[in-house]
Amino acid sequence: MLAILHPNTPLDSDAYRETLHFLENLPGVTLRVHEVQGATQKLTEIYLLGETKSLDRDEITALPAVERVIRISDDYRILGRHKDSLRQNGFSYNGVTFNQENLNIFAGLCAVDIQAHVETMMSTLQQHGQVCTRMGAYKPRTNPYSFQGHGKGCLPWVFETAGKYGIKVVAMEITHESHIEEIDECLEKLGRPTGVMLQVGTRNTQNFELLKAIGRQRTYPVLLKRGFGITLNESLNAAEYLASEGNANVVFCLRGMKTEAGQPHRNMVDFAHVPTVKRLTRMPVCVDPSHSVGSRDRAPDGILDVMHATAQGVIAGANMVLVDFHPKPEKALVDGPQALHMDELPAYLEDIQLCHETWKKRQAIYKDLRGPTAT
């Protein structure tokens, strides 16, 4: 069972104390409190765990701080929608809003190589009104002899450059819980010129100890990539691991499934699951067309496959795009052959905006056909 409090309820108010006192004294029930920071308001959710079937829903709804009560299912207890269309989705971080309605673009370097490339990337993004990017400092690789990333050594100049060009959120994959501390210490030392979204790569989707460590910290939101060889349900439960430890500020990323059936693409593009994830959970959904397609192959219509894949995800309602760009792809240390070129950025951004507007128009077309139980 879930008790959702009135928006912006002060935790030191009499209404909150009275409500909490009542709930804490329910027999056989333990509480878990989550705070969700939206763009304009903070929402407090109290999860009642244990013997809740016999509880009087109306009695709990009547408590002074409670707005409404939801009976939740076992699946995705914290991140699930539970057929409640009013549940707040998404969150705000460092001045950027992430929810199931808007769209953020994270174009950048799959792997940080030299400072000049970072400078060019972020400067170009600023020129085109972008405030988010991706920058890989820690790179898990299949081959032990491949470039593993510069690690903490590149963090100072990556973060300083981000601050210089007004980049507010940097998506950065981590592979060990010690990386959280390295990122946090560096940002603190520099005066926090930017923000970081911790990225969990597809290989670590079921690294449960890493998920727990990331979930225990609430400073940084998380971008969780779907596991490339497991079911959607298993990957969504990985996201629930993060939330169950306390951090529900999670974006779920579809990045393609590893199967020979996907050839000639690097992975089988799974962007049809964008609306499915949004229906099952409150998480914003990201698509990663670069790692799905894995090449710069061009269709007969003159459009790159990676751009077609991006359009598929955004027209289906994706809320974030994670995509590889590079000033000199031929010199990239990781995934250069799939990176888009800097002169392709303006058209790419225009295409994405067109697709996002098309998604909004599609919603309007079907608005009158929605049933009374639509969520």
Image: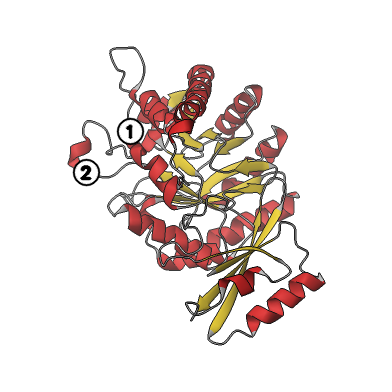
Give the labeled residue for mark 1: 294
Q: Amino acid at mark 1?
A: Gly
Q: Position of residue 325 (x, y in %)?
A: 48, 29
Q: Which mark is residue 14?
A: none
Q: Amino acid at mark 2?
A: Thr
Q: Total of numbered circles in the picture?
A: 2
Relative to 18, residue 101 above or below: above
Q: Position of residue 30 (x, y in %)?
A: 56, 80
Q: Is residue 261 left or right of residue 208?
A: left
Q: Which comes sooner in the sequence, label 1 or label 2?
A: 2
Q: Secondary structure at mark 1?
A: loop
Q: Residue at x 68, y 44 (%)?
A: 194
Judge depth for marks 1 and 2 and give the one in front. Answer: 2
Q: Residue at x 47, y 31 (%)?
A: 368
Give the labeled residue for mark 2: 259
Residue 177 in sight from this viewpoint:
no
Q: Residue at x 43, y 47 (%)?
A: 279
Q: Position of residue 287 (x, y in %)?
A: 43, 38
Relative to 7, residue 306 above or below: above
